[in-house]
Image (cartoon, helix red, strand yellow):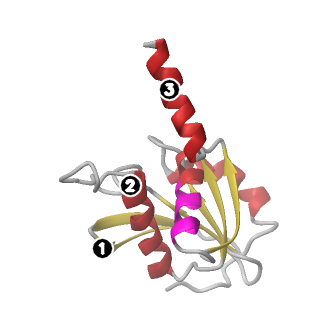
């Protein structure tokens, strides 16, 4: 799908994994080093990671960022039901992109929603990532989610 070797590449590629297309960006490409996938926060896009590239390229070979469905350069995501627009559905959509790009076993950095998506993907498909670094993920345990819901209801 891509070649290692150039000291620095920055290109846009769009493809159709399933359901709709996602845009992914190869932010860095060098001959050796582990692969890093970067997943952005809600309402943002993959370009927010560009300021980090100089540092990241010292540690990673290929760096890929995916624009989530309906965000960044990915086209609008038309969902027909609440289930199709759920976090689990979005995570599965991103997982299909990971498979299509051959990124299984990569490291992943997820900011906010991106961290949540990484956790959901790993929970549904164990072994997808070598390691997850989630920065500010909106994650709750089932008991934590119930307590938060009760607190919100009592404050209303």
Nearer to us: label 1 or label 3: 3
**Nearer to the camera, 78 or 85:** 85
- Label 2 to label 3, Cα distance in Å? 38 Å
Q: Is residue 138 visible?
A: no
| x and y, in percent, of residue 134 in the image | 67, 52
* Residue density around tag 1, few if under 14, some if 14–19, many if 20 or more, within 10 Å: few
Disc 1: which residue:
18
Q: Residue at x 48, y 80 (%)?
A: 99
Residue 30: quarter of image: bottom right
In the image as oriented, which residue stretches furthest toward the left?
80
Image depth: mark 2 or mark 3 in front? 3
Using the rendered image of the protein, determine whether residue 87 is visible from the camera's viewpoint. Answer: yes
Q: Tags 1 and 3 in contact by the CB under 8 Å rule?
A: no
Relative image position of residue 80 (x, y in whole percent): 18, 53
Q: Which residues are magenta?
A: 117-124
Q: CA distance from mark 1 to mark 3?
A: 38 Å
104 horizontally vs 133: left or right: left
Q: Residue furthest right?
A: 58
- Residue 155 pos. (x, y %): 49, 13
Label 2 sits on a secondary structure element that is loop
Tell me which residue sits at (79%, 57%) in the image.
55
In the picture, the quarter occupied by the C terminus is top left
In the displayed structure, 15 sits above or below 42; it is below
SS at badge 1: strand
Majority secondary structure in the magenta region:
helix
Circle 2/circle 3 CB separation < 8 Å: no
Mark 1 and mark 3 lie on one chain; the one further toward the N terminus is 1
Of the numbered discs in the image, which one, if any, rests on residue 73?
2
Q: Spatial distance from mark 2 to mark 1, Cα to Cα?
A: 17 Å
The residue that label 3 is drawn on is 150
| 7 drawn magenta | no
């Amino acid at each position: 799908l891509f070649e290692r070797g150039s000291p620095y590449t920055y290109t846009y590629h769009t493809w159709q994994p399933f359901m709709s297309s996602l845009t992914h960006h190869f932010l860095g490409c060098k001959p050796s080093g582990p692969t890093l996938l970067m997943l952005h926060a809600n309402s943002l896009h993959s370009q927010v990671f560009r300021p980090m590239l100089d540092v990241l390229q010292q540690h990673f070979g290929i760096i890929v960022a995916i624009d989530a469905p309906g965000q960044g350069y990915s086209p609008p995501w038309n969902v027909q039901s609440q289930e199709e627009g759920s976090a689990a559905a979005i995570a599965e959509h991103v997982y299909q992109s990971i498979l299509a790009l051959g990124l299984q076993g990569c490291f992943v950095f997820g900011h906010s929603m991106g961290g949540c998506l990484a956790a959901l993907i790993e929970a549904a498909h164990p072994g997808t990532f070598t390691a997850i670094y989630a920065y500010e993920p909106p994650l709750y345990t089932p008991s934590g989610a119930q307590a938060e819901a009760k607190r919100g209801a009592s404050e209303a």
